[in-house]
Amino acid sequence: MPVDEIVRKIIISALPILFAIVLHEVAHGYTAFKLGDPTAKFLGRLTLNPISHIDIFGTIIMPILLYILSNGQFVIGYAKPVPIDPSNFRNPKRDMALCAASGPLTNILLATLSFLFLKYVLMPISDITSFELIESVLKPFTLILTASISINVILASFNLLPVPPLDGGRILMGFLPHRQAIALSKIEPYGFLIVIILVIAGISNLIVLPIARFLLSLIKML
C-alpha cells in the first residue's frame, strides 16, 4: 500500500480509535463509581479528556503498527486501564463483571450510533446536496463513521475473549462458581502473553470474527 494511502487511512481512523478507547475506559470507571467505587473519579479518570487516558504504546504506536502490518485490515489498541477497587463494591464478583461488560457495551453503542447517523442522516443528505459538498464534507464524514463502526465492533469483540485481564475474562469470572473463578483469575498476570500467542497463532480469530460478524448483522438490521 502506498505511503500516502496509509497516512490518509490512519488520519481517518485516528478519531474513531481515540473515541472508542477513551469511552471504553470511562465506561469502566463510571460503572464502578455508580456501583460504589470512587477510585477512578478521585484520580480524575472520569473525564473525556484523552490526555488522561492515552497510553503511548497502546493508544498510538500499536494501532498504527497493526494497521500497517495488516494492510489496513486489523486495528486494535488500548488506553491506560481505569483503576477499580473491588473492595468498595457491595457484591465484588458481580460488580466487577458489570464493570467489565460496560466497556464492550459502550463500543457496541458507539458502532450502532455511527451506523444510524450514517444511514439516516448522511445518506439522505447526500441524495439532495451538491457534488462539491459531498466530496468536501460528506465523504470524509462517511469514511470516519464507517471506520468507527468497524473499529468499535472489533474492539468490543476482541475484549470479549475469555482471558483475564480482558473484559471477557472478567465477565466469565462473574458467572463461574467461586473455585473456578479463582482458578481463572490466577492466569491474569500472564493474560496479555496468552492473548498475544492466540493472536499470532490465529486462534483468537475463531472467537473474535464470529462475534464481530454477529454484532455487525444486528446493527445493520436497524
Image: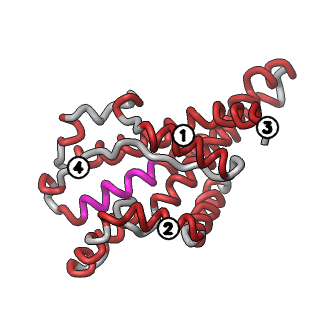
| 187 to the left or right of 202 | left
Labels 3 and 2: the sequence-earlier one = 3
- Disc 4 to disc 3, C-alpha distance: 43 Å
Magenta segment, which residues? 94-106
Q: Residues within 10 Å of mark 2 (few under 14, many from 20)?
A: few
Three-letter code for the amino acid on which mark 2 is drawn: Ile
Label 4 element class: loop
Quadrant hosting residue 181: bottom left
Asked if the residue under mark 4 is in contact with the one under mark 1, i.e. CB atoms within 8 Å, the reply is: no
Residue that mark 3 sits on: 2
Three-letter code for the amino acid on which mark 3 is drawn: Pro
Residue that mark 4 sits on: 84
Labels 2 and 1: the sequence-earlier one = 1
Three-letter code for the amino acid on which mark 4 is drawn: Ile
Q: Position of residue 187 (x, y in %)?
A: 31, 70
Label 2 element class: helix
The residue located at (49%, 47%) in the rendering is 77
Residue that mark 1 sits on: 17
Label 3 element class: loop
Residue 197 tag number: 2
Labels 4 and 3: the sequence-earlier one = 3
